[in-house]
């Protein structure tokens, strides 16, 4: 058993992460294309390319280090991090494209390796009379040898070879920096700041050079083989990124000061003309491309192996075969698949077009890593506690710049890359619809944003309740599943202008059973609210008494960050029990100074939602503004898009002239927010009941608003105040305890 554990124990430290990353950063493009960049856009333009490129890579390296120090990073590297942070749906979609780009990168570096033999072609032609016109004579044998070594020896041999090629790479750079040319002896440093005629545009050159900076995540693919990933990944990745950036700055200066722009553009092996011993550059190129190819060959199969272990592919036998490893967890089967892909692209001989879309996929990967870090910062998930922390603004900037550069480099490829990943995401979601990791992150972000807004609003200076009133309504209902009238009114009021909290009241003692029942009802009400597209916040209360439930509900904090100011109840016409309990607890609303609305539901419902009738009288002038405000707010909902408001005022016939003059004064001064022409004044003849007039005129109204005064609630016959309206539909009785002044 102990021997088995020793065999499976991870064996790599920080150095392999650094070497894998730095050998990929200082790779083929540095030898073959960096001179072209300096000759095309000049020294300052090249520095700008290096700067912009690292505006992507440094935030990504920091985000990667942060995410890696939060969780155990297992085999699969970047794929493991993304899939465990975003969920398998998105992680697998990005992971598959990431794997393809890594696999094709093997072919890309092998083809670049064959370029190192350009310098011996004239010698072979002169000595043997044979012209080597096809670089596949070198690339295919090299790839076959590498495949054999990786399948038979695995990552151990890869790391040993990596030490050798990195040593050659360092020696070649030293020889390059020690070299000199006649051009450098007469070079004037002021020419470094000259702007060259850009025959090749900045972003065209950037697209060619940027893959040189993308190697900083190469070492993460060894995560499953590291002794301490939480230490090795941040340290190795960040060190390689910074060292690579510094080296590229010095290389740019050396090239600009050692050769003319024309020579830099025309000779892809110009570094060999500058080095003190020219042949070291092709040797270094061969070493760099081999090390990059080795790095990609070690990373790509591990990404594919992790995807197979997550059972992403539709066939379980494929998942098992791909995810299977040797006794030391070497991804032999995944390596075989990677080998076939690499051979295919090497036989094509030219992957320039493919290289651009590889860049797109890498950009999406880096953008995803930065986005994860940014969202996790605001989600404040207790399980997200990285020992290394990046800055949220760096991660956000990295994500934005990735998307921007994708479209600046090649819009067609950018759209293609995103389209392919969207298709993969939709397919994987269809097959694995229970993976919602991304939703959890966004849910955490929304929670934190909501909390911050509410705290800010609570601390901010409160608005005048008279001049800037808006409804923040609590509704407490026992009959949520019998009648939806209260839910409808709350939906209309909270559609745009108001805020609504709907509370379902379960009468009884709090127990495990009653708690489970209330949670079940809560989910049902949330579904009802969602299907009706309402903006309500739904809650449930379990209490043994109505008074306790009302007192508990009325102390609920406002969901807007501002305190609640209105209470809504609902009862069915003809049923007195719940109405009596509301009236009995009226004193509670006076204590907290809540406006009170009581909805009397009828069998007519809300009809066609076209006519709202408001009835006012002298005793209701304080209620009138609230009734008018609520009516306008309700009309703002699409359900009432063809509705209109009609206002009726009733007075004794003997006081009619005096009351008309008083109404005119109220409307002209703005205390009633309407024109006097929109109020129809009706006289009440002696012996005629006001309820009879309302029943007659509002019999066809879809909603009728009637005010009532608090003093009426103290009488023994207070229940009768809400009865006697049998001929009209739903009625909203309104009582305000604070004046509303409407500008």
Image: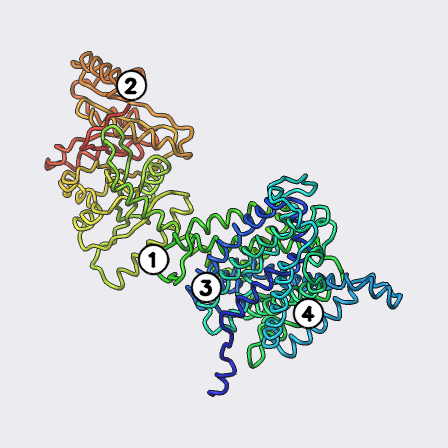
Q: Earlier in the sequence, mark 2 or mark 3?
A: 3
Q: Residues within 10 Å of mark 2 (few under 14, many from 20)?
A: some
**Is the Cβ of the residue at disc 4 closer than 8 Å to that at disc 3?**
no
The quadrant where residue 123 appears: bottom right
Q: Which residue is mark 1?
A: 520
Q: Is residue 84 left or right of residue 161?
A: left
Point out residue 128 in the picture as x, y percentages from the top left corner. Answer: 87, 68
The disc placed on residue 68 is 3
Looking at the image, which residue is at 39% across and 34% down? 637
Which percent across, then down, holds residue 450? 34, 47
Residue 586 can be seen, yes or no? yes
Above or below, 432 against 146 in this view is above
Residue 204 x %, y %: 66, 46
> Of circles 4 and 1, which is in front?
4
Residue depicted at x 45% and y 50%? 394
Quadrant of the drawing holding the C terminus: top left
The reply to whether residue 412 is in sight is no
**Would you name the residue on which mark 4 appears?**
339
Q: Against 693, is 146 above or below? A: below
């Amino acid at each position: 058993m102990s021997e088995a554990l020793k065999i499976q124990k991870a064996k790599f430290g920080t150095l392999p992460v650094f070497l894998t990353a730095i050998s990929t950063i200082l790779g083929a493009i540095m030898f073959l294309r960096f001179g072209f960049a300096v000759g095309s856009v000049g020294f300052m333009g090249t520095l700008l390319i290096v700067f912009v490129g690292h505006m992507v890579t440094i935030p990504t390296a920091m985000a990667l280090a942060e995410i890696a120090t939060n969780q155990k990073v297992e085999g699969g590297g970047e794929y493991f991090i993304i899939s465990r942070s975003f969920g398998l749906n998105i992680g697998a979609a990005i992971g598959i494209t990431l794997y393809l780009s890594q696999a094709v990168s093997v072919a890309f570096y092998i083809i670049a390796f064959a370029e190192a033999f350009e310098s011996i072609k004239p010698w072979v032609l002169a000595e043997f009379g044979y012209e080597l016109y096809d670089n596949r004579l070198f690339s295919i044998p090299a790839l076959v040898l590498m495949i054999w070594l990786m399948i038979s020896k695995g990552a151990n041999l890869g790391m040993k070879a990596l030490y050798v090629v990195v040593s050659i790479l360092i020696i070649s750079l030293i020889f390059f920096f020690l070299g000199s040319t006649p051009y450098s002896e007469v070079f004037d440093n002021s020419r470094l700041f000259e702007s060259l005629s850009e025959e090749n545009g900045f972003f065209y050159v950037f697209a060619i050079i940027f893959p040189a900076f993308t190697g900083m995540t190469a070492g993460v693919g060894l995560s499953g083989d590291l002794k301490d990933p939480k230490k090795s990944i941040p340290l190795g990745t960040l060190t390689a990124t910074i060292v690579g950036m510094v080296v590229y700055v010095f290389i740019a200066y050396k090239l600009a000061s050692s050769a003319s722009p024309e020579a830099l553009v025309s000779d892809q092996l110009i570094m060999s003309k500058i080095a003190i011993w020219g042949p070291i550059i092709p040797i270094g190129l061969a070493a760099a491309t081999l090390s990059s190819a080795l790095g990609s060959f070690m990373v790509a199969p591990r990404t594919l192996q992790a995807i197979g272990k997550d059972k992403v592919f539709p066939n379980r036998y494929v998942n098992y075969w791909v995810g299977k490893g040797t006794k030391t967890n070497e991804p032999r089967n995944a390596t075989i698949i990677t080998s076939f892909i690499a051979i295919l692209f090497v036989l094509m001989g030219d992957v320039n077009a493919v290289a651009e879309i590889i860049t797109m996929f890498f950009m999406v990967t880096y953008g995803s890593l930065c986005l994860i870090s940014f969202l996790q910062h605001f989600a404040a998930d207790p399980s997200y506690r990285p020992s290394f922390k990046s800055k949220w603004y760096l991660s956000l900037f990295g994500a934005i710049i990735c998307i921007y550069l994708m479209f600046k480099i090649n819009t067609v490829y950018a759209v293609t890359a995103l389209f392919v990943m969207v298709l993969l995401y939709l397919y994987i979601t269809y097959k694995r619809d229970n993976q919602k990791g991304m939703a959890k992150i966004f849910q955490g972000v929304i929670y934190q944003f909501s909390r911050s807004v509410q705290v800010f609003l609570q601390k901010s200076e409160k608005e005048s309740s008279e001049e800037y009133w808006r409804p923040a309504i609590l509704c407490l209902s026992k009959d949520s599943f019998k009648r939806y009238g209260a839910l409808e009114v709350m939906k209309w009021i909270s559609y745009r202008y108001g805020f609504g909290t709907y509370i379902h009241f379960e009468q009884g003692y709090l127990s495990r059973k009653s708690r489970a029942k209330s949670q079940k009802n809560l989910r049902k009400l949330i579904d009802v609210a969602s299907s009706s597209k309402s903006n309500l916040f739904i809650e449930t209360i379990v209490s043994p008494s109505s008074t306790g439930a009302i007192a508990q509900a009325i102390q609920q904090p406002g969901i807007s960050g501002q305190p609640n100011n209105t209470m809504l109840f609902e009862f069915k016409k003809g049923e007195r029990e719940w109405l009596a309990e509301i009236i009995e607890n009226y004193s509670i609303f006076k204590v907290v100074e809540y406006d009170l609305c009581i909805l009397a539901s009828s069998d007519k419902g809300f009809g066609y939602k076209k006519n709202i009738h408001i009835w006012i009288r002298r005793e209701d002038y304080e209620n009138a503004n609230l009734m008018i405000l609520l009516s306008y707010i309700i009309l703002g909902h699409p359900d009432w898009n063809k509705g209109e408001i009609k206002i009726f005022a009733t007075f004794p016939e003997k006081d009619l002239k005096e009351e008309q003059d008083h109404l005119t004064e109220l409307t002209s001064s703005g205390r009633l927010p309407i024109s006097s022409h929109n109020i129809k004044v009706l006289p009440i003849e002696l012996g005629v009941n006001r309820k009879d007039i309302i029943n007659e005129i509002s019999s066809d109204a879809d909603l009728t608003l009637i005010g009532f005064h608090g003093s009426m609630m103290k009488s023994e016959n207070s229940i009768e105040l809400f009865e006697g309206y049998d001929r009209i539909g739903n009625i909203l009785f309104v009582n305000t305890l604070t004046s509303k002044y409407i500008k």
